[in-house]
Amino acid sequence: MITADFRAKAEKEWQKITNPSIPQIFIGMATCGEAAGALSIYKSIESTLMKNHIEARIHKTGCLGMCYCEPMVDIIKPGQPRITYRNLEPETAAELITDYLVNNNYRTDLALGAWGEAIDGIPNLFEIDFLKYQERTALKNIGVINPEDISQYIARGGYKGFEKALCTQQDEIIDEVEKSGLRGLGGAGFPTGFKWKECRKTESYPKYLICNADEGDPGAYMDRSLLESDPHSVLEGMLIAAYAIGCSRGFIYIRDEYPLAIKRVRTAIEQMGQYELLGENILDSGFNFDIEIREGAGAFVCGEESALLASIEGNRGMPRHRPPYPAESGLWGKPTDINNVKTLANIPAIITNGAEWFADRGTGSSKGTAIFALTGKVANRGLIEVPMGITLRKIIFDIGGGIPNGKEFKAVQTGGPSGGCLPAELLELPIAFDSLAVAGSIMGSGGMVVLDEDTCMVDVARFFLDFAKQESCGQCIPCRLGTKQMFDILDDITKGKGRQTDIDMLLELSESVAHTSLCGLGRTAPNPVLTTLRYFQNEYEAHINHKRCHANVCRLLVEEGNIDE
Amino acid sequence: MNKIAPVLSFFKKRDDKPSDKELIRENPCIDCSLCLEVCDKGLWPSILLEDIKNGRFADSKKHGIDECNDCGDCTTECPMSIPLFKYLRLGKILSFYNGNKSGLIPILLELQSNFGYLPKDMVSHIARFLKLPEGHIHSVASFYKSLRLTPPGRRHVCICRGTACHISGAPQLTRDTEKLLGIKEGETSTDNEYTLDNVACVGCCALAPVITVNSETYGKMNSDKVQKLFKKTDTKDENPG
Ligand SMILES: Cc1cc2nc3c(=O)[nH]c(=O)nc-3n(C[C@H](O)[C@H](O)[C@H](O)COP(=O)(O)O)c2cc1C
Ligand code: SF4
Ligand code: SF4
Ligand code: FES
């Protein structure tokens, strides 16, 4: 066991941070924070502290999910709550340090919120719209702890789920996960407990566990944030899954566009080794398990599970026919369980708090919470975790703060290249696996891109087909050539060369591509076209019949006065 | 400072590097052990080279290959101009995966992070060491977008073409950048300064549209910021936004 001693020590350390004797400064240093300039903020704060001879401790945290407020800094002054400051610049950060730490001025103008209570004109952070409607379980640690320090994770109840699992029968753990109703958050929504059971049942050894962190959906970054801000929650989920299924070796497949996530996971794995949470005879339980990082190399199709297996084996990432499913014959022909990052991050909480607690939230057959990366034309862009069943309107207008610059909402795209665009009429739609499927889109892995009146829906469809065309592995003809043909037609339409027959042709091609492709990429590639045709057919018609693009996006139509190139 | 050097002046320092074939078959090493003398880490580079050439990765580990810090002194010193340290780098990567075929993609990625691309001669060596047909490696390398077989320019510019960036103006950004740098997407400028590429998404979608230069990420880009970004060519510029 992680000795009670160690846990107590970690908790005491954490107490010293949350209830400190010297000021504690937290700087959000995930990729988005760094891109927004967190590094220069860090330097500026460091030098200001030095100049003023202030003794303080600086922590690098991940991202709180409020990307629209980056770069962000939190400060805990002795006797004060943690206060979050937003949109800092190196100069304002320096001012903040002298004003708050030296002169006791809260700098309300820079503050976003105070943790737990409102003070002096600073609202309670968790009461502001962006956070009010969220329920954070998988994301409970992001932006709160230093992701490179395992003891902070442990202090906040980390690895309790794993300890509990070690004292439980494997079958009982799987039952618990099954009862919770957790469904895969990687896109397909397959019941996790069932998948584990299948894999456990297969009599073949060794068994492998893979965490799928090949977040390929362009325009989404939930997995990246989670791995950068709280890697241990995912790794703990992997430990529990491996123990329950009986896997002896694990891989975490991270795309190489996420160097910081790779670095943080590497650090986390090293620290787990130091605390006997990996290797042989973990915590004296007789359970052996090791985790290895594998980097993806920029192929979207490698997120598909059988392609991912091929990639780990050192081959081209080409999907293969299923069945046999990986749970029967996966990596090197052995039973393999593949789960998404967010699915695994939910596991520790389910084991600690029980299946009922998890199943309490959500609706119908979609339990628990959904994690989305809210981006595009929306005021508050960021990472959100909301209970299943919440409406699109609540997400976009209450949490997201609506459309900026007084523009009109047009559609919301979910599920990335496999999903679709939902129009304003569907804003009251509750978010769940089934409801989204009925509307023609999918839950997907959590990308949610808001489109405003300046977006041309034909251009969006063309964009996704361009993506599918480029990322198709080329194995099956319907996908390789079908997406190309569909792209060509859409391209013609956006260039003012659309024909009357194009819409029928698109529908026909969609049907054949969707029904005759081998893997999910080809099967879902027509979705963006089908949904835009279903909800925005008038835009297609305007392009074809009147050579007009109402959003002024399709350039040739606009600039060259409807004349062919 | 070293005792053998005067004796060695007798061998004329080669002007050309030995070819790969020479290296493998004939081994131009004359056992002068100068590389041993010069290595700060106390390694014997020529012995390590033998290990690697013969695919004895376990031995190369035993002989301390992981300690090599890529200083390159052995290569400068070698009277026969054997590119020792290039091979030591490759050997270090291969020995980490113990010559295991399934490590092919990480090996190629690692190789690329060392050299900026996959040099042809290195690819042939990997094929030999892993006992794979060279064609297989080329088929893998051409499948994955991150792997490149030609060297990129000094500054590798990638414009994000993800959904969030696309609707926030990435196409216009691409046109601007193409005009500014005078190259099309996928090309490298003639002075080898810039390579322009696209990337599927770097995960900073909230800051769309995004450009990366080498591994720096720049968010909320627009035409003006692009101008500024590429104007100050020589300095390692700070974030313009
Ligand atoms: C083209 C394609 C891309 C996919 N990309 C991802 C991905 O990036 N991340 C992911 O977790 N699952 C992805 N999946 C789904 C996986 O195949 C698989 O269903 C998932 O990893 C299972 O994990 P889960 O049960 O936790 O959802 C993709 C599927 C397809 C067809
Ligand atoms: S559907 Fe497309 S991506 Fe999938 S196997 Fe076929 S060609 Fe490859
Ligand atoms: S490159 Fe490596 S082996 Fe050669 S001298 Fe430097 S440390 Fe020694
Ligand atoms: S869409 Fe450009 S960073 Fe994600």
Image (cartoon, helix red, strand yellow):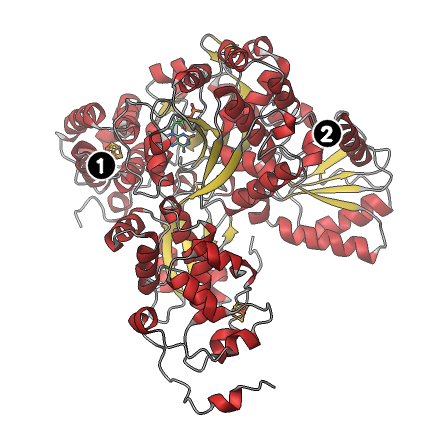
- Give, as a three-letter code, the residue at label 1: Leu
Residue pictured at 18% horizontal, 37% vertical:
A489
Judged from the image, the secondary structure of the residue bearing numbered disc 1 is helix
Residue A39 position in % (x across, y down) = 63, 52
Residue A58 appears left or right of A518: right
Q: Nearer the viewer, residue A84 or A459?
A: A84
* Quarter, ligand 4: top left
Residue pictured at 13% horizontal, 30% vertical:
A500
Q: In which quarter of the image is the N terminus of chain A?
A: top right
Give residue A185's mark. Answer: none
Residue pictured at 34% horizontal, 52% vertical:
B130
Residue B146 position in % (x across, y down) = 37, 50
Q: Chain letter of disc 1?
A: A
Give residue A490's mark. Answer: 1
Q: How far apart are marks 2 and 1 (CA)?
A: 54 Å
**Mark 2, other Cα within 10 Å: few <14 / some 14–19 / many ≥20:** many
Residue A453 position in % (x across, y down) = 39, 32
Q: Quadrant of residue A4?
A: top right
Judged from the image, the secondary structure of the residue bearing numbered disc 2 is helix
